[in-house]
């Protein structure tokens, strides 16, 4: 995500319905196909700011603070998305199809890596670690070529 998109992104996912902070983080990760998982350090301050500005309100539900948009928040969400030409993840997806392919492959790599970590033998985990380390080195090497 581009810098500064957290506010619009949080508003957009809250427009889909109330949620607590970790649910919002999961929704954002899902919206970006796993390419972006915002930190709690960016989501919770944004939620507090939205509440302070009257764009969101919170309530306690099942021991969790759940946030939802106010009427002003829904209007602000619509305005921001209209002005930008879409949600942050929609705009990000239109930037370049190669980026989408890279992200999809990275997500598949992540799934495979998690599976190895969960069920792999020690030697498989060692080999997987070497593969991922070598891929990282090759990517940085490619950047250093420029």
Image: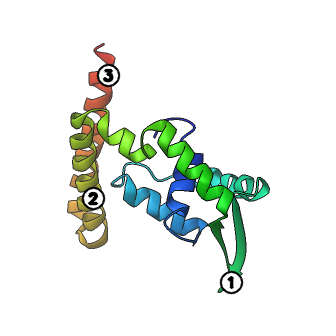
The reply to whether dot 1 and dot 2 touch (C-beta < 8 Å) is no
* Separation of residues labelled 3 and 1 (CA atoms): 47 Å
Location of residue 138 by image quarter: top left
Q: Residue at x 38, y 56 (%)?
A: 31
Left or right: 31, with 94 as reference point:
right
Q: Which residue is mark 1?
A: 63
Residue 81 visible in rendering: yes
In this view of the protein, can residue 6 be seen by the observer?
no
Q: Is residue 45 left or right of residue 22?
A: right
Q: Is residue 142 left or right of residue 76?
A: left
Q: Which residue is mark 3?
A: 143
Residue 129 point in image, percent of width and height: 28, 51
Q: Residue at x 46, y 64 (%)?
A: 26
Residue tagged 2 = 113
Label 3 CA crowd tier, 10 Å (few <14, some 14–19, many 20+): few
Q: Residue furthest right?
A: 52
Quarter occupied by the N terminus: top left
């Amino acid at each position: 995500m581009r810098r500064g998109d957290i506010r619009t992104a949080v508003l957009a996912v809250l427009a889909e319905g109330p949620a607590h902070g970790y649910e919002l983080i999961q929704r954002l990760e899902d919206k970006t196909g796993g390419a972006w998982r915002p930190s709690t350090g960016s989501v919770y301050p944004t939620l507090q700011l939205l509440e302070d500005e009257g764009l969101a309100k919170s309530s306690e539900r099942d021991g969790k603070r759940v946030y939802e948009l106010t009427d002003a928040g829904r209007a602000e969400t619509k305005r921001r998305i209209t002005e930008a030409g879409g949600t942050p993840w929609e705009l990000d997806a239109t930037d370049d199809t190669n980026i989408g392919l890279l992200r999809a492959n990275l997500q598949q790599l992540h799934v495979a890596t998690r599976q190895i970590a969960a069920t792999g033998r020690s030697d498989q985990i060692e080999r997987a670690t070497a593969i991922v380390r070598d891929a990282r080195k090759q990517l940085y090497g490619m950047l250093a070529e420029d």
